[in-house]
Amino acid sequence: MNARLRFWLALLTLFCLITGPFLATAVLLMAEMPAEERRVLTDMLLPRLPIGVMMTGLGLAIGLAILRGLFNQYVQGLLKMSEMTQLMLGANRNFRVEPEGPPEVQMLGQAINQLAQRRDELRDNLELQIQLANATVEEEKNRLAALMSELTQSVVVCNLDGRVLLYNNSARAQFRAFVEKGGGAANLLGLGRSIFTVLDRNLISHGLEALQSRLAAGERQPATHFVTATRAGQLIRVQMAPVLSVLTQAGAAAATPQQAISGYVLMFDNVTRSVEKETKRDEMLQHLTEGSRAALANIRAAVETLIEYPDIDAEQRERFLRIIGDEVLSMGQRLNRTLESHSDSLKARWPLEEMLGADLIAAAQRRIESKFGLSVKLDEVDDDLWIKVDSFSLIQAISYLVSRLHETFGIRFLRLRLTRNGRLAHLDLIWMGVAISTETLHGWEQEPMNLSGENSPLTLHDIMDRHGGEIWFKRESATQQAYFRLLIPIAAHQKISESVPQFRGDSRPEYYDFDLFKRRDQDHALDERLLTELTYTAFDTETTGLRPAEGDEIIQFGAVRIVNGRLLRSESFDQLVDPHRRMTAESIAIHGISQDMVDGQPGVEKILPDFHRFCEDTVLVAHNAAFDMRFLQLKESSTGIRFNQPVLDTLLLSAVVHPNQDSHKLELIAERLGIAIIGRHTALGDAIVTGEVFLRMIPLLNGMGIHTLGDALAAAQKTYYARIQY
C-alpha cells in the first residue's frame, strides 16, 4: 500500500472517529425513546443541527491539518530519508541525510549518517586492501595498454562474437581513414562494437575454422592470413591469430587440459598502395616483354635476311642495319625506363618511419660528440617539423661525413641546422673555413662507409637515394661557412589525439576491456537482458528552440558509449549541424552556440546517418528523451533513418527510484548522485552527465527489483512524467 492511499485511509478513519460516536449515540437513543419523546427531541435538535455540523466540520478540519502535518513529518519524511539512505548505499557514498522534522526523525537521520561514516571507513580500508592485492594485475594491464597504444601496427582483439575488446591508436586512426575514404564521419571502432562493420562475417568464420584445424593438428602458434576490401574500396591484409584459454575435460583416468579459442587477434595492413604499385609494375613488365618481343622479331628478321642474302646491294643492307640499330636503341630506352621505375619501386619498399626532426638532430648531436669528441651546436631547428626517414642509416651517413671532415681537414667545431623547404627538409652540416671540391664529395658518396671500424656495404649515395633525397655542398663566401645539405622527405604527420575529445581526470583512453571475453551475445529477447549486460549510447541534442513540430531544428549532436558498465569518453560523437534557419537570442543564451558556429556545417541529412551508425546495436539513453526522440522522428520521412532501438529516459527512471523528490532536473539528479557537471548545455557535456547518472541509477534500480531492460521500461511508463508529449 503506497503512502498516498494510507493517508486517505487515515483521513477516513479520523472522520469515522469524529462523527461515528455521535451518530451511533443518536441512533441508539432514537431507537429506545417513545414516539412522543422522539418527536420533542427532533424538534429541539433540528434547529441546532447546522451548529453541530459546523463544529463537526471544524473538528474534522483541525484533525485533517494535524494529520497532514504528522504525515509529512513522519511518513513522508521517513520515505524521503529512506531514498537518501539508498543513495548512500548505492549511487553516492558521500551523500549524507539532512536531519529535519521532529526530534525523533532527526535523531534517526543522525544515526544513519554515523552508520554511513563507519561503513565508509570500513569500505576504504577494504578497498585499500583490494588495491594492494590487485596492484600487480593493474600494472600488467597498464603495461599492455601502453604497449598497444604505441605500436605502429594496427591491432584489434575480439571475442568469438566479433565484439571488440581491445584496440590501439593505430587501429583507431586506420579505421577512421576507412570511413573518411567512404565519405562518412562516424567511428567504426569502439569497445563492444562489432568488427563485422568492416570485415565480412564469412571471412572471420573461415579464419576461425582454419585456426581450429591448425590447432587440432598440433601447431603451437597457429595463424592465418587473408586480404579483403573495405566498403570504401581499400585493400587490407589481415593476420589472424587465436586467443587461447585452457579447458579441463574430465576423462576416464584424469582431467585432461585442452586449449580452446576464446577470441582472436587481428593485425591490419593497408596494402592498397602496395597492390597498386605491384599492378603498375606488372603492367610495365608486360609492356616491356611485349615491346621487346616485337623488337627482337624485327632484329631477327633483319639478321636472317642479311645472312641468307649476303650479296644484297649496299642500300638495302644499310636499311636493314638501320632497322637493327633503331630496334636496339628502342629496346635500350625501354629497358632504362623500366629500370628507373623499378628503382623507384625498390626505394618505396625501404622502411621509412615518421619521427620528429628535432629528435633526429638531438640523436645525431649526441653521437658526434660521444664518438668523435667534437663540439656540436644547434643553429636553427624547426621544432614542429616531422620527417620520414630511416633514422639509423641517416645518422650513420651524418657520422660518416663528420668522420671524413675530421680526419681529412681536422674540423673540430660543427653546427647542425634543420629547416623546412616545401615538400623537403634541409638538414645542414655546417663548419667554418675549409672548402672541399665536388670531386671529393663525389668520391665520398660512392665509396662504402667505413666509420671507425664499423663497415657498411651501403654508400652515402645509396642512403640518400633510398630516402629519395640528395646531398649538396655549399659555401657562403661572405661568412666563410661551408656546409653539406641533405635533402630528406617531410612526413605528413597527424596527431591522432587531436580528434579525440579529452576531459579532465583522464590519463589514457580506455581502449581495452578484458571482461568482454566472458560475454557472448544472448539468444533471449533484448527485454530479458540484464541492465548490466547491455551496451548503451547516452546522447543529447541542442536545438534552435523547444517546438520541434513548429520548425525548430537540431544544431548539435553529442553522444558517448557505455560498454560493460563503463562510460567511454574517448568513444564519443560531437558534431555541430547547420539548421538552415536563424536562431533566436533566447536559444543562444542557453546553449551558447552562435549562428556563425553552425553556418557552413553539414546539414542534419548528412549527420544523421553517421549518428545512426554510431548508435546502432545499442540501447539509447537520454534525459527527457521524448524531446530528443521527437526531433529524430520528424526526420524519418526525409532521411529514411529510423531509430528503432529501445530508449531509456533518466528523467523517468529518476521518478522511479526517487518518487518523493521535488525535482528531477538533470543537474539536481547529478548533485544527488554526487556527479560533477562539466559542459552543461552542450550536447556532448549533457550526454556525458546523462551517462554517468544512468550508471549510478542501475544499482538503485536493482535494489527495487528492476534488473532487466523490460523491467526498467515498464517501471518508467508507470510514472507521471511518461505522459509528456512534444
Image (cartoon, rainbow, N blue to C red):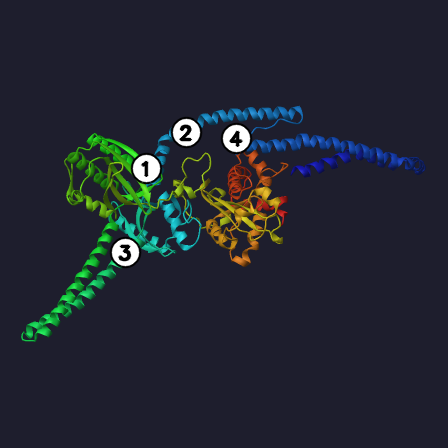
Identify the mark nearer the N-term, 3 or 4: 4
Side of 352 relative to 658 (left or right) = left
Kindly check if marks 1 and 3 are in contact, taking CB atoms under 8 A apart as contact. no
Identify the mark nearer the N-term, 4 or 1: 4
Q: Quadrant of the N terminus?
A: top right
- Residue at which label 3 appears: 277
Q: Nearer the viewer, residue 112 or 421?
A: 421
Residue farthest along the front direction in this orientation: 478
Q: Secondary structure at mark 1?
A: strand
The answer to whether 436 is drawn above or below residue 225 in the figure is: above
Three-letter code for the amino acid on which mark 4 is drawn = Arg
Q: Give the percent coordinates (x, y) of residue 614.
A: 46, 49
Side of 28 relative to 314 (left or right) = right
The residue at 49%/47% (across/down) is 575
- Residue at which label 1 appears: 381
Q: CA distance from mark 1 to mark 2?
A: 50 Å
Task: Answer few, some or many: residues within 10 Å of disc 1's Cα (few below 14, many 20 plus, some between 14 and 19).
Answer: some
Q: Nearer the viewer, residue 426 or 152?
A: 426
- Residue at which label 4 appears: 93
Identify the mark nearer the N-term, 2 or 4: 4
Task: Answer few, some or many: residues within 10 Å of disc 2's Cα (few below 14, many 20 plus, some between 14 and 19).
Answer: few
Task: Answer few, some or many: residues within 10 Å of disc 4's Cα (few below 14, many 20 plus, some between 14 and 19).
Answer: some
Q: Secondary structure at mark 4?
A: loop
Kindly check if marks 3 and 2 are in contact, taking CB atoms under 8 A apart as contact. no
- From where the camera sits, is residue 308 visible? yes
Mark nearest the camera among 1 and 2 is 1
The answer to whether 346 is drawn above or below residue 448 in the figure is: below
Q: Secondary structure at mark 2?
A: helix
* Residue 130, label in figure: 2
Q: Give the percent coordinates (x, y) of residue 8.
A: 71, 38
Q: Give the percent coordinates (x, y) of residue 277.
A: 27, 56
